C-alpha cells in the first residue's frame, strides 16, 4: 500500500507539460519487392532523468505498449525485438524490482509485404507509456507513421528450354510427314485435273454421239418420207416410211408375214 501512496504523491509533485518520451519510425530497406520483408524500427527517446518500462516488467509500473492502427496488408514475421532493460530494486524492499528503459532505445518489427501490394504501404500506430523519475510517474501517449515503397513488378521474359535430342528428332519427323503430305496432295491434285479432263472429253463425246444419233434419225425420217412407193397390192414398200405414216395418221400398221405390208 505504501508503494501506491508513494507513487501518487510523486505523480502530484511532477510537471504535466513535458513530453518526456518521443518516438521516431523508420523502415529498412526503404524500397522492397513484393513478397519481401522490411524492418520497422521505433526509436524511443526518454528525457534525461526519466525512464519507461519494459513489456516484461514484473513491478507495479505499466509497461510501454504499442498498437498498430494501419498495416496495409503487412504481416509480422517472428517476435518483436525489445532492447535490454535496466533492473532497478527498492533498497527498502528487495522483492520490488522494475525493468526500466531509459535514454534512447529501439523496438524492431519484421513485416512481410503481400504479393499483391500496391506501390506505397502505410504503417500507422500509437503508444502508451508510463514515464517516471525519482519524484513521480506520468502517463504519456503518442502516434507514429511510416511508408514502405514497393518496387514495380518486373516483366519476366518467357523462358524457353534448350532443344533436346528428342525434340530435334520430333521436328525432323514432323518435317518429313509434312513433305509426304504435300507430295500426296500434289499427286491427288494432278489426278483430279486428269479426271476433270477425262470428264470433259467424255461429255463432249456423248454430246457428239447424241448429235450423230439425232442426225441419223432425222435422215431416216426424211428418207422414209421421201420413199412413199407402193407395190401392186397398195402396200408401202419402205418399212420406215410405212411406220412414220402410221404414227403420223394414228393408224395401226398392218404387217404381212409373207414379208409384204
Image (tube, rainbow, N blue to C red):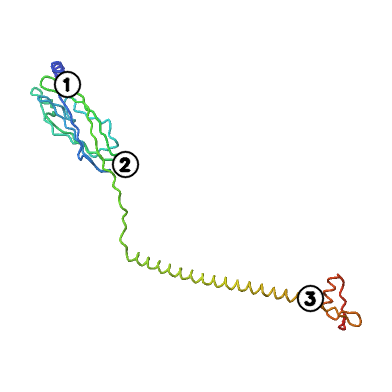
User: Can you name the residue that lies furthest to the front here?
Assistant: 226
First in sequence, mark 1 or 2: give its number: 2
Residue 157 placement (x, y as % from top left): 30, 52
Say which label, 1 or 3, has the lower sequence index.
1
Q: Dividing the image into 4 quarters, which one contains the C terminus?
A: bottom right
Quadrant in the rendering for residue 118? top left
* Residue found at the very far left of the displayed protein: 91
Q: Residue at x 88, y 76 (%)?
A: 254
* Marks 3/2: CA–CA distance: 101 Å
Examine the image and state in which quarter residue 144 appears.
Answer: top left
Q: Dot 2: few (<14), some (14–19), or many (≥20) neighbours within 10 Å?
A: few
Quadrant placement of the N terminus: top left
Q: Mark on residue 138? A: 1
**What residue is disc 2 on?**
116
Pick the front one: 36 or 201: 201
Judge whether 203 appears above or below 124 on screen.
below
| Residue lying at the far right of the rendered structure | 233
Question: At numbered mark 3, what does the secondary structure look like: helix, strand or loop?
Answer: helix
Q: Position of residue 151 (x, y in %)?
A: 26, 43
Q: Is residue 82 left or right of residue 250?
A: left
Q: Nearer the viewer, mark 1 or mark 2?
A: 2
| Callout 3–callout 2 Cβ contact below 8 Å | no
Q: Which label number is shown at residue 19?
A: none
Q: Which mark is residue 222?
A: 3
How far apart are the two marked residues, 1 and 2, measured between alpha carbons? 43 Å
Amino acid at each position: 500500500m505504501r508503494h501506491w501512496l508513494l507513487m501518487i504523491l510523486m505523480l502530484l509533485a511532477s510537471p504535466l507539460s513535458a513530453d518526456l518520451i518521443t518516438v521516431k519510425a523508420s523502415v529498412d530497406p526503404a524500397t522492397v519487392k513484393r513478397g519481401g520483408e522490411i524492418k520497422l524500427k521505433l526509436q524511443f527517446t526518454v528525457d534525461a532523468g526519466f525512464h519507461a518500462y519494459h513489456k516484461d516488467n514484473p513491478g507495479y509500473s505499466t509497461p510501454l505498449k504499442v498498437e498498430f492502427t494501419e498495416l496495409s496488408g503487412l504481416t509480422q514475421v517472428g517476435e518483436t525485438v525489445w532492447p535490454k532493460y535496466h533492473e532497478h530494486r527498492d533498497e527498502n524492499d528487495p522483492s520490488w524490482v522494475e525493468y526500466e528503459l531509459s535514454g534512447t532505445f529501439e523496438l524492431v518489427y519484421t513485416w512481410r509485404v503481400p504479393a499483391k501490394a500496391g506501390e506505397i504501404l502505410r504503417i500507422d500506430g500509437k503508444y502508451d507509456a508510463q514515464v517516471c523519475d525519482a519524484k513521480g510517474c506520468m502517463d504519456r501517449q503518442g502516434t507514429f507513421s511510416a511508408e514502405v515503397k514497393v518496387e514495380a513488378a518486373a516483366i519476366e521474359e518467357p523462358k524457353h528450354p534448350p532443344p533436346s535430342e528428342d525434340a530435334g528428332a520430333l521436328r525432323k519427323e514432323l518435317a518429313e510427314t509434312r513433305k509426304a503430305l504435300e507430295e500426296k496432295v500434289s499427286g491427288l491434285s494432278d489426278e483430279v485435273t486428269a479426271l476433270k479432263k477425262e470428264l470433259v472429253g467424255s461429255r463432249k463425246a456423248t454430246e457428239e454421239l447424241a448429235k450423230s444419233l439425232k442426225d441419223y434419225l432425222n435422215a431416216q425420217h426424211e428418207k422414209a418420207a421421201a420413199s412413199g412407193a407402193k407395190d401392186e397390192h397398195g402396200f408401202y414398200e419402205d418399212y420406215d416410211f410405212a411406220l412414220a405414216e402410221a404414227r403420223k395418221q394414228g393408224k395401226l400398221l398392218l404387217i404381212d408375214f409373207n414379208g409384204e405390208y
